[in-house]
């Protein structure tokens, strides 16, 4: 298509054409990105090749001074009279060797395992320091940096020799030490200037980032916190935890509340966790379900028969302490340790197992206990075991489903009380459970009701009203509740009190053998905790929505304000600007913390709203006063009966309110920046553009759309990009305003509804010590930012060229 | 319509159909246009006034709350029922000035000597230099000397304050120390990086810039724990948190070179070249030609570096964890409003906030011009 074709198109077609062009451009941009990366590696490859060639050629053609320099750095320079260079090379080499052989090498050697010995206390009470995975990794990485720096310096040292030889061959003198120093302020000035910043960035930015990238591949968290518990490499497990949609093994844990309610925590196959509360009446069935199909909750003492397929293995032995693993036929694993004093016994037990025919008996309470093994010949060995840990069997392939009710039968369960009243629980239709109390008189009807239900009847709850005579002899309306049992034409009303309907569903446990146990569950929807991947998706979504609004809303509003202030005829321009700029000048932790408190439930905003719009507030009194003055009873009654604001507005307690409030307050913080930027740029728009537009009869809106906006967008394109990625990482606003709250339902990993990826990362690091996931999250934030940046950079060519501005 | 010649303004319209030129009295039309303009301006004023109120209200409330005598957290009224200065008095209770602290022990003496001798030497250096030719200005040297002297005196003063019994003064002085050091070191770092990346073409320059770009995309708090351990090995956490914070924020500051590089890019290269031809070394070019021209961006960089530490909460709280005497204002005041005793400390938080905000705001307002220049330039260049 040529320009003429384009100009001929209608506006809509042009728009469509541009949209198409944008999306057509994306594959090309991605391809360009890929090629860039490939070229980068190609460049590295050829670079390394050239360097190697250089080194070899220098050695072949060099004289003996050069050759000695290959092992004793700086020798050649020193012998040729460049004593300062030579000395520096030599000092560096010595320092490096001392560091490497006396310090660094030990850490590098331990990198593959990240340490094996934990900190422990000997029998005498002395503390023995073992390895520290953290330090191993930190100094390991640092040593690698040093090795790279050494290799580079060594190469420079070799190259210096070659250059010196060539200069001497051409008959010129070499640079003296004094000239060397002088050149550091002249030709080599950039090295002087950059030395400190580069060193600082390497040690305090690059080293930590590489460290954290490595942490993403370990299990470094609260449970693996050195030196008491070491961490180790786990590959991509952490990425899987955060991103995978794979099914996780199903697991159930149960706990009993003092009131008899059983709480179940069920991890479903997609990783979502359901916290369920089971009716006390169902407790036995829950136990049965768990015991028979689920987790074989191991009872102590545990008997191990010689014929059973149980296995005891020694997993690790170090410094006399042994770790052992016991596997039961149902897949349950126990791990435990024996101490140094029992080393011989432990080894004897392991030997005995090799002979076979061993039966055993284990008791444990908490994490300590005893294991007695009896061999085929009757000898018994008893081991005192510590750190006993039970891992539920993983080989049970249990299904877990919130199944629909299998039949529509409505059932009624009754519990007769001593005073004649009856408590009933009815499984009604649509997963509704009705609990009610029936008086002694009405209870007689229940037999009929049960008959109706058995015949396939239904039940519903109805509110009714009747007229009663109260103590004063007046007739008054009284509300009451009835349960209406219906089956065909038969209808039976049973009056009941304390009627509660609960939405309950069934949870069905299916064992590997196909056995099914189903349970009635309360409160299903309230307490679901989604899996980490789902939480991550939600947090990412909100991060992007936030970044979008924080960038573009501020951008357009800020521009609007700038246009208003700069409009001809508006006075006190400087005053307006100064007032707005206040939010930049005052440290954010003061302004944002204060504003956050202002919008709290007991804050100023809610207080004022309540005192004005609240019940008995200013507005109501005022209307009533007016009504009284004008004798308008209708108005008075209206004001009296009106539902005035009773609750404070949930600025921080409701997720959606909090999001909107944050975006709103961010406008308050953000507009001034944009106002300043836009002011500077608006001044630069050639005035004759506006002049000619006005002559052509364009109105204010048209000039804005046709001149101001395109110009602004063109000039501030790069700024928009940086500000978008900046907002993705905008920690302060979220942290100081809402702190990520409200938390609770719907998110796992302690994330709150207004948490950005970056604040979530902060929480993981500081509150949960979940460093591994924080590291993964950091990498993902980087990926998100990098993708946005690369795509935009490749789509807008004008952004790329820095020299254009010079 | 000018009064001088009193000629009524008219529009001339070509009526093609009639083929004549007519004169139209435009008075009514004009008035309506003016009225329209006035209405627009009036609504703009209205919007601006409302905005100003919204923008200023929280700060006015903050100041008013700091004078509130009634205890408790937020209240539903604006004007305090009981005015008091107790909240401010609380902040300073227990602090006193004790010159003996300057020579308390060996390290204190060493530090005092170092600062003062260095300062005096610096001031002397600034004043001693005589202009080589009569055209050269000496004005900037006076300013430099004054700035340096004031800085040294301020550092001495900070060290004279005995704040062992007064948290807020301790926090304030901690922050001030960090801010002063950051302003000096970060500015030097950023200017050297941006100068060499902008004016000198050397091998690996593009690579350095790309590395900075990539590093910048990693979220800042990712590396918090590693930095903490690094600082811990140097003893720069808890008790030494102030030094640690200075070190960390200065070490990586070279990466924030974008805005000043953008400024250097706009200076014509011929300046350097002609000076080089005249025999100046690069160092001389940097010091004597570029720096005087770069005054706005130097001031912008100093301003930004100075203001940064006042709002630094995250890393500061992590490094100073549990050691109240090492907090900065942000950590200390944040802790006041987020403890269980928030009700008791709220008005004190407001008073502290006011005391922190006033110097920063005044400084910012004075140097606003440079800030606008930096921000605008930076935004255009990206």
Image (tube, grey):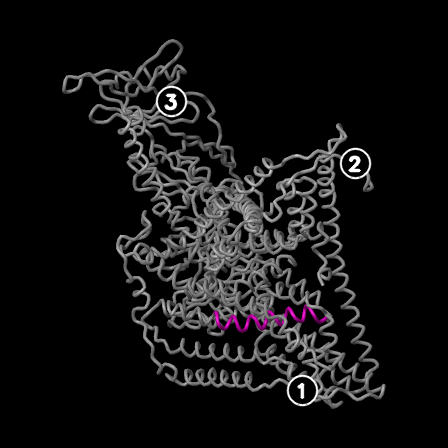
Q: How far is the residue under mark 3 from the one under mark 2?
A: 75 Å
- Asked if both marks, 3 and 2, belong to the same chain, the answer given is yes
Q: Which residue lies furthest to the front in this view?
A: B5
Residue B192: say if magenta: yes
Q: Residue A411 carries which label?
A: 3
The residue indicated by pointer 2 is: A8
Mark 2 or mark 1: whose residue is earlier in sequence: 2
* Residue B243 to residue A711: above or below: below
Magenta part, dominant SS: helix
Secondary structure under tag 3 reads strand
Closer mark to the observer between disc 3 and disc 2: 2
State which region is magenta. Answer: B179-200
The residue indicated by pointer 1 is: A87
Q: How far is the residue under mark 2 from the one under mark 1?
A: 74 Å
Secondary structure under tag 2 reads helix
* Residue B22 to residue A787: above or below: above
Closer mark to the observer between disc 1 and disc 3: 1
Query: Which class describes the residues within 10 Å of circle 3: few (<14), some (14-19), or many (20+)?
Result: some
Closer mark to the observer between disc 2 and disc 1: 2
Query: Which class describes the residues within 10 Å of circle 1: few (<14), some (14-19), or many (20+)?
Result: some
Relative to A436, A740 lies left or right: right
> Is residue A597 at least partly visible in the picture?
yes
Relative to B135, A41 lies left or right: right
Residue B5: say if magenta: no
**Residue A788 point in image, percent of width and height:** 64, 50
Point 39% across, 16% down: residue: A457
């Amino acid at each position: 298509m040529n320009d003429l074709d384009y100009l001929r198109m209608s506006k809509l077609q042009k728009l469509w054409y541009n949209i198409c062009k944008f999306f057509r451009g994306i594959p090309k941009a991605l391809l360009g990105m890929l090629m860039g990366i490939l070229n980068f590696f190609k460049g590295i490859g050829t670079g390394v090749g050239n360097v190697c060639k250089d080194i070899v050629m220098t050695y072949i053609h060099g004289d003996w001074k050069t050759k000695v320099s290959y092992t004793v750095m700086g020798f050649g320079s020193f012998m040729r009279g460049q004593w300062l260079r030579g000395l520096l090379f030599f000092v560096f080499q010595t320092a490096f060797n001392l560091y490497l052989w006396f310090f660094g090498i030990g850490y590098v050697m331990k990198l593959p395992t990240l340490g094996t010995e934990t900190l422990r206390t000997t029998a005498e009470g002395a503390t023995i320091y073992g390895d520290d995975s953290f330090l191993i990794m930190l100094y390991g990485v640092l040593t690698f940096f040093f090795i790279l720096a050494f290799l580079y310096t060594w190469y420079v040292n070799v190259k210096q020799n070659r250059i010196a030889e060539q200069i001497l061959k051409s008959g010129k003198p070499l640079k003296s030490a004094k000239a060397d120093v002088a050149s550091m302020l002249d030709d080599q000035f950039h090295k002087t200037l950059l030395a400190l910043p580069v060193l600082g960035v390497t040690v305090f930015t690059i080293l930590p980032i590489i460290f954290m990238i490595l942490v993403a591949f370990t299990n470094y968290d609260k449970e693996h916190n050195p030196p008491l518990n070491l961490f180790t490499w786990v590959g991509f497990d952490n990425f899987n935890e955060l991103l995978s949609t794979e099914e996780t093994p199903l697991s159930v844990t149960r706990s009993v509340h003092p009131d008899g309610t059983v709480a179940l925590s069920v991890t479903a196959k997609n990783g979502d966790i359901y916290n369920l509360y089971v009716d006390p009446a169902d407790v036995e069935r829950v136990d049965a379900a768990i015991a028979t199909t689920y987790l074989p909750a191991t009872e102590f003492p545990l008997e191990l028969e010689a014929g059973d397929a149980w296995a005891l293995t020694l997993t690790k032995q170090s410094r006399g302490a042994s770790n052992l693993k016991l596997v039961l036929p149902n897949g349950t694993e126990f791990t435990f340790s024996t101490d140094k004093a029992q080393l011989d016994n432990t080894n004897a037990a392991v030997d005995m197992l090799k002979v076979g025919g061993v039966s055993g008996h284990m008791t444990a309470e908490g994490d300590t206990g005893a294991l007695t093994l009896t061999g085929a010949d009757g000898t018994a060995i008893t081991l005192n075991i510590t750190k006993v840990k039970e891992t539920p069997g993983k080989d049970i392939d249990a299904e877990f489903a919130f199944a629909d009710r299998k039949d529509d039968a409505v059932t009624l369960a009754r519990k007769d009380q001593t005073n004649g009243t009856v408590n009933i629980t009815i499984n009604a239709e649509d997963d509704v459970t009705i609990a009610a109390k029936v008086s002694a008189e009405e209870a007689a009807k229940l037999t009929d009701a049960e008959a109706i239900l058995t015949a396939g009847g239904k039940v519903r709850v109805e509110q009714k009203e009747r007229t009663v005579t109260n103590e004063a002899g007046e007739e008054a309306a009284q509300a009451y509740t009835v349960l209406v049992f219906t089956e065909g034409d038969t209808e039976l009303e049973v009056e009941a009190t304390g009627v509660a309907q609960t939405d309950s569903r069934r949870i069905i446990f299916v064992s590997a053998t196909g056995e099914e146990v189903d349970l009635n569950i309360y409160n299903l929807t309230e307490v679901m905790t989604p899996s980490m991947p789902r939480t991550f998706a939600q947090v990412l979504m909100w991060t992007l929505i936030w970044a979008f609004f924080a960038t573009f809303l501020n951008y357009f509003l800020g521009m609007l304000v700038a246009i208003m202030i700069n409009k001809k005829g508006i006075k006190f321009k400087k005053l307006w600007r100064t007032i707005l700029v206040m939010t930049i000048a005052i440290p954010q932790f003061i302004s944002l913390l204060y504003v956050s408190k202002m919008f709290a439930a007991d804050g100023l905003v809610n207080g004022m709203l309540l005192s004005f719009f609240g019940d008995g507030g200013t507005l109501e009194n005022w209307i009533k006063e007016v009504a009284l003055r004008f004798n308008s009873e209708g108005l008075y009654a209206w004001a009296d009966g009106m539902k005035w604001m009773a609750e404070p507005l949930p600025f921080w307690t409701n997720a959606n309110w909090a999001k909107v409030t944050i975006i709103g307050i961010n406008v308050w913080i953000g507009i001034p920046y944009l106002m300043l930027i836009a002011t500077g740029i608006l001044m630069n728009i050639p005035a004759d553009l506006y002049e000619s537009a006005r002559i052509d009869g364009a109105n204010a809106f048209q000039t804005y759309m046709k001149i101001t906006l395109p110009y602004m967008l063109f000039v501030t394109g790069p700024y928009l990009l940086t500000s978008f990625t900046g907002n993705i990482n905008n920690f302060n606003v979220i942290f100081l305003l809402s702190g990520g709250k409200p938390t609770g339902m719907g998110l796992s990993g302690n994330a709150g509804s207004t948490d950005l990826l970056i604040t979530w990362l902060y929480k993981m690091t500081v509150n949960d010590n979940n460093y591994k996931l924080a590291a993964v999250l950091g990498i993902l934030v980087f990926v998100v930012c990098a993708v946005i940046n690369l795509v935009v950079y490749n789509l807008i060519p004008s952004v790329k060229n820095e020299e254009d501005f010079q | 319509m000018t009064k001088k010649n009193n000629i009524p303004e008219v529009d001339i319209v070509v009526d093609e159909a009639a083929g004549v030129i007519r004169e139209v009295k435009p008075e009514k039309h004009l008035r309506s246009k003016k009225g329209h303009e006035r209405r627009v301006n009036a609504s703009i004023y209205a919007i601006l006034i409302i905005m100003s109120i919204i923008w200023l209200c929280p700060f006015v409330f903050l100041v008013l709350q700091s004078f509130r005598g009634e205890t408790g957290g937020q209240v539903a009224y604006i004007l305090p029922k009981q005015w008091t200065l107790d909240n401010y008095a609380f902040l300073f209770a227990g602090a006193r000035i004790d010159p003996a602290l300057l020579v308390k022990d060996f390290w204190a003496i060493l530090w005092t000597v170092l600062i003062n001798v260095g300062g005096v030497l610096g001031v002397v250096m600034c004043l001693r230099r005589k202009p080589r030719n009569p055209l050269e200005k000496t004005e900037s040297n006076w300013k430099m000397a004054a700035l340096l002297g004031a800085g040294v005196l301020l550092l001495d003063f900070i060290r004279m304050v005995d704040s062992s019994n007064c948290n807020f003064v301790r926090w304030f002085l901690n922050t001030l120390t960090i801010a002063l050091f950051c302003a000096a070191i970060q500015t030097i770092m950023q200017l050297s990086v941006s100068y060499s990346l902008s004016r000198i073409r050397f091998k690996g320059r593009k690579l350095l810039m790309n590395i900075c770009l990539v590093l910048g995309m990693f979220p800042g708090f990712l590396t918090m724990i590693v930095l903490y351990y690094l600082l811990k090995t140097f003893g720069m956490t808890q008790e030494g948190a102030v030094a640690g914070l200075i070190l960390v924020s200065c070490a990586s500051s070279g990466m924030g070179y974008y805005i000043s590089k953008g400024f250097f890019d706009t200076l014509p290269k011929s300046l350097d070249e002609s000076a080089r031809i005249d025999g100046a070394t690069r160092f001389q070019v940097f010091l004597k030609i570029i720096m005087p021209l770069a005054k706005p961006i130097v001031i912008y960089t100093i301003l930004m570096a100075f203001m940064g530490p006042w709002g630094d909460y995250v890393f500061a709280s992590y490094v100073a964890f549990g050691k109240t005497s090492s907090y900065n204002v942000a950590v200390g005041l944040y802790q006041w409003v987020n403890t269980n005793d928030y009700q008791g400390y709220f008005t004190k938080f407001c008073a502290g906030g006011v005391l922190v905000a006033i110097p920063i705001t005044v400084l910012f307002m004075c140097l606003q011009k440079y800030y606008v220049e930096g921000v605008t330039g930076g935004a255009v260049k990206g």
